[in-house]
Amino acid sequence: MARIELDISHSYKPRPQSDDDYALLPLKMSFNDGGAYALLGPSGCGKTTMLNIISGLISPSQGTVHFDGVDKTDATPQQRNIAQVFQFPVIYDTMTVGENLAFPLRNRKVPAARIKERVGQIAEMLEMSHQLGQRAAGLSADAKQKISLGRGLVRDDVSAVLFDEPLTVIDPHLKWQLRRKLKQIHRELKLTLIYVTHDQIEALTFAEQIIVMSQGRVVQVGTPEALFERPAHTFVGHFIGSPGMNLLPMDTVAGGVNIAGQDVGAPAGTAVPQGKLTLGIRPEYLRMADIGTAGVVKATVEKVQNIGTCHLLTASVGQHLLRARLPLEQNPPAPGTVAGFAVLGPHSCFYKNEELIA
Ligand SMILES: Nc1ncnc2c1ncn2[C@@H]1O[C@H](COP(=O)(O)OP(=O)(O)OP(=O)(O)O)[C@@H](O)[C@H]1O
């Protein structure tokens, strides 16, 4: 295992002119030895580029990559001692499951007894012990991808294991099991795992630290809790969560604040920063309250859906939409009702130029 440090930028164009020409804008990132990380962001934000720079498949157009303080910028994936798992299975059809799992160890001339022990351990973790003697050729796509995961995890001497959307071909039910399994495997094997995904559930279940990316930038690195409670950027607020954070324009006025065109008082005990800002509040924390009370905006209820775990309510404040996850035991207001929603309180986040300031 190794501590990995990036101080890089990358453009696929020979003479980049503007920020848009960069797949990765200048960034500094470090991955601690033994950590579980997810690179999360929408398609095209630069996740795979970052992963390929870590593995050595791509050289950054500027900057350096260090493993345990040693400059590895020009080293190959083999020299970096990286294991990789891709979107689609990379296995030998003619070999058995056991032979496939053993392959990376045989290649490194690991003693036979150790190979047997480690293959047994990995197969057990992936619930493939009963399939060890089976030829890979006849197996389903799911089972083949599980072998790929196993091959990525079987060596205990790698600097890191990199996963690029490894659960894409996996059936949804098994996907759910494997996400948890990977977390458990991380706890048991203590490997450094770096996992690329555009699926927030996958990132939130698996990783200790999530690196949220947007348009070639790292916009926040944090625990799942930090990304939920205190998104550092409006992009993170909106991107993480289902639905994402409610965002409303806000400005200071005499005696209180103007939120999306409505003057409201600030509730006692809530420090509201001054100036033209964006107010963020998660649907999980948005609650109904009496109109006229401090920190409460009026909104017209547009839709109420029972989604099993809560009522998901959509309401409009002028041209802005608010979403609230209300407890099932609460009787929700009917569409068309004008109701009050408490937007200022301990869970409110305040953004200036998209960055969290309070
Ligand atoms: N080989 C390449 N040549 C030129 N441009 C590329 C190349 N690979 C990626 N890009 C561009 O670099 C940017 C970042 O791409 P990258 O594949 O790293 O994003 P991503 O977040 O992994 O997206 P996805 O989830 O779709 O794979 C995109 O604008 C993409 O079009």
Image (spheres, rainbow, N blue to C red):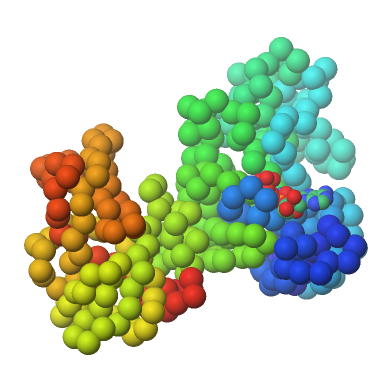
Of 64 and 239, the residue lying toward us: 239
Residue for point 74% across, 59% down: 23
Q: How far across and how far down the image is residue 227, in percent? A: 45, 61
In-image side of 234 versus 217 (left or right): left
**Count of marks, rendered view:** 0
Q: Is residue 236 visible?
A: yes
Q: Position of residue 299 (x, y in %)?
A: 21, 56
Left or right of 182? Residue 299 is: left
Residue farthest toward the bottom in the current orientation of the protein: 254
Residue 18, quarter of the rendered image: bottom right
Work out which quarter of the rendered image holds the C terminus and state it.
bottom left
What residue sits 27% from the left and 58% below the top?
A: 317
In the rendered image, which quarter is residue 150 located in?
top right
Query: At 49% across and 68% down in the image, what residue appears?
Result: 233
Which part of the image, by quadrant, shows the N terminus? bottom right
Q: Is residue 140 left or right of residue 245?
A: right
Which is nearer the eye, 56 or 237?
Answer: 237
Does 323 sit above or below residue 310?
A: below
Front one among 231 and 318: 318
Residue 34 in view of the camera = no
- The location of residue 124, given as percent across then percent down, is 58, 30
Instruction: Determine whether, in the image, residue 291 is placed left or right of residue 356.
Output: left
Residue 205: x and y, percent?
A: 47, 47
Q: Is residue 335 depicted above or below 268 in this figure?
A: above
- Placement of 230 over or under 326, stated as above or below: below
Residue at image position (81%, 62%) is 11
